[in-house]
Image: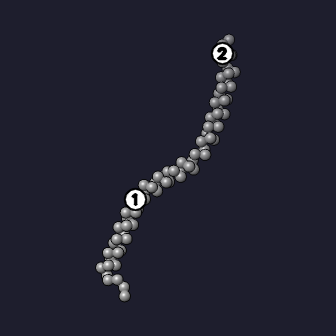
Amino acid sequence: MGMPEHEVAEEFHRRQVQGQAAAQLTQPLLKRGWRIAYVGWASPILPVIGFFFLVVLSIVALIHGVLSPALLI
C-alpha cells in the first residue's frame, strides 16, 4: 500500500528543492558565523599586542629621555 510512483517522484523533487533553498539561505549566515567565531577567537590577543607596544614604547621613551639632555650640550 505504498504511494504511486509519480507521487514519490514529486515528493522527492519537493524535498530536493527545499534542501537547495535552505542551503542558499543559510550559506551567508554560516560565512558570517565563521567570521564572528574567528574574530572572537583572535580578539584576546589584542591586549597582548598592546602590552608589547607599551613595553617597546616605554623603552624608547626612556632612551629618548636619557639621550635628549646629552644632545643639548
Please, which colouring scheme is shown?
A: one colour
* Residue at x 65% of width, y 23% of height: 64
Q: Which mark is residue 71?
A: 2
Instruction: Give amino acid for label 1.
Output: Leu
Corner quadrant of residue 61: top right
Residue 5 location in percent, x, y? 31, 81
Q: What amino acid is found at the position of numbered circle 2 in the picture?
A: Leu
Label 2, residues with CA under 10 Å away: few <14, some 14-19, many ≥20: few
Q: Nearer the viewer, residue 22 or 38?
A: 22
With 63 as the anchor, is 9 left or right in this view?
left
Q: Which mark is in front, 2 or 1?
A: 1
Q: Is residue 1 left or right of residue 60?
A: left
Task: Classify mark 2: helix, strand or loop.
Answer: helix
Residue 42 numbered tag: none
Quadrant containing the C terminus in the rendered view:
top right
Q: At x 54% / y 48%, what residue is drawn? A: 39
Q: Residue at x 35, y 75 (%)?
A: 11
Q: Decide: marks 2, 1 in contact (CB < 8 A)? A: no
Residue identifier under label 1: 25
**Residue at (62%, 37%) from the top-left corner?**
50
Image position, residue 60 (x, y; %): 65, 27
Q: Position of residue 10 (x, y in %)?
A: 32, 75
Chain-order first, disc 2 or disc 1: 1
